Amino acid sequence: MTNSRRCGQIDPNGRDVLLRKLNLDEFEFAVLSAARHFFASFASPSEGFWVSAFLRAENFFPGNASAETMRLVLDMVQKIRMSRKSTLRFSNPHCECCAPFATEEERYLVQMLQAAGRNDLSTLYMSSMLLCEGHETDHVHTSIRRVLAMKEKIDLAQPISLAPFI
């Protein structure tokens, strides 16, 4: 049986999970949410999702480093796209039926973020090989570490407001 959501998006492998099961901290959730906007921009270039993402960068990453963090997330997304050969499945950040779910590929991205943050190289390499389909991962690792380095520059005392994006 194939799972589908009310909006009709189909999970072909039945591997999508609710985001709350991923134990994301605020920063990881913001990175995934920003990445989804960039994935959506590449999937539907005429929609201009990247413009709204950059204009609301402060909502994703409060503080003075918001634009730079968004740029680094975009660089990470581009490195992932360049490493893969097939289309990446992601949950539409503008769909209230899809946004609460993480696709298999998004789970690998989250695992990479969490593993890099813990310096768990085994999980980092395994997740990146799965996400990048066995292709080049060194540039992806570098980009993820750059994104994570921004966590210290983000004002986490201010709540990350993602409500306009879900």
Image (cartoon, rainbow, N blue to C red):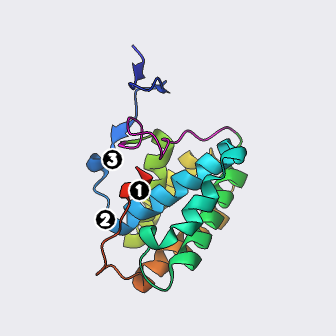
Nearer the observer, 123 or 139: 139
Magenta stretch? 86-100
Q: Which residue is mark 3?
A: 19
Quarter that holds the N terminus: top left
Callout 3: SS:
helix
Side of 6 where 138 appears, left or right? right
Q: Which residue is mark 1?
A: 164
Q: CA distance from mark 1 to mark 3?
A: 17 Å
Asked whether the viewer can see residue 142, the reply is no
The three-letter amino acid code for the residue at tag 3 is: Leu
| Residue at horizontal 46 percent and vertical 26 percent from the top | 13
- Was residue 90 drawn as part of the magenta stretch in this picture? yes
* Residue 129 placement (x, y as % from top left): 57, 50
- Was residue 59 drawn as part of the magenta stretch in this picture? no
Mark positioned earlier in the residue sequence (2 or 1): 2
The three-letter amino acid code for the residue at tag 2 is: Asp
**Residue 25 badge:** 2
Q: Please tell me whether residue 107 is drawn above or below residue 62 in the rendered image.
A: above
The three-letter amino acid code for the residue at tag 1 is: Pro
Q: CA distance from mark 2 to mark 1?
A: 19 Å
Q: Nearer the viewer, mark 2 or mark 1?
A: 1
* Residue 151 placement (x, y as % from top left): 42, 78
Side of 32 where 159 appears, left or right? left
Q: Please tell me whether residue 14 is drawn above or below residue 76 in the rendered image.
A: above
